[in-house]
Amino acid sequence: MSRLWLLDGRSGSGKTVLADALAAELGGVVVHMDDLYPGWDGLDAGSRYALERILAPLARGEDAVWRRWDWAAHARAEEHRLPAGSALVLEGCGALSRASAPLAERALWLDCDEPTRRARALARDGVDDWWERWRAQEDAFYAREGSRGLATEVRGCP
């Protein structure tokens, strides 16, 4: 049986940094939602893709097979496979939804104030041209899914 942990929170909240520590604790691997979104307007599509290609198959005892999103080529790239029974931390915006929460053994949400998150994102990405566009998708997704309320654990900024 696969062990599935979800790690969600808004952009810049520290998910990627925490994901490696969680994977070590779990004895598993990390899959980043950033590798699944089909571009800057793809939060919803990336969340569905993760559910359909990774979480649901593992929860059914099947291998997960997906293709990484190549941001430069604007297309799906190489195939990845995770064997049935694997331990997984799925990290990123949109990981925790009403559909994914029941499949997870543990679901974490990171709370972090917007000025800190925005400064981190700017330091990470070098530009923030996409910030408002991505934030609008986060607002819609989290309002619809109630992701924070689905979490089994809520943490502050790491």
Image (tube, rainbow, N blue to C red):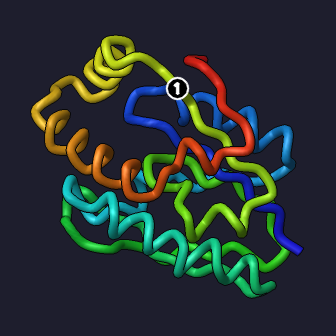
- The image quadrant that residue 76 belongs to is bottom left
Above-or-below relation of 7 to 46: above
| Picture residue at 57% right of the left edge, 70% below the top | 99
- Tell me the amino acid under the disc marked 1: Asp
In terms of image quadrants, where is residue 101? bottom right
Q: Circle 1 sits in a helix, a strand or a loop, which is it?
A: loop
Q: Measured from the top left, where is residue 4 in percent x and y?
A: 75, 60
Note whether 66 is above or below 146 in the view shown.
below
Taking depth in this image into account, of 139 and 79 the one nearest to the observer is 139
50 or 82: which is nearer to us? 50
Q: Residues within 10 Å of mark 1 (few under 14, many from 20)?
A: some
Q: Residue at x 47, y 27 (%)?
A: 13
Q: Is residue 31 above or below residue 50?
A: above
The structure residue drawn at horizontal position 34% and vertical position 19%, both measured from the top left corner, is: 114
Residue that carries the numbered disc 1 in the rendered image: 111
Q: Is residue 152 left or right of residue 8?
A: right
**Snapshot quadrant of residue 8:** top right
Residue 156, percent across and down?
Answer: 60, 19
Which residue is at a point 85% across and 39% down the rendered structure image?
25
Percent x, y of residue 14:
52, 26
Q: Out of 109 and 50, give the one closest to the viewer.
A: 109
Quarter holding the C terminus is top right
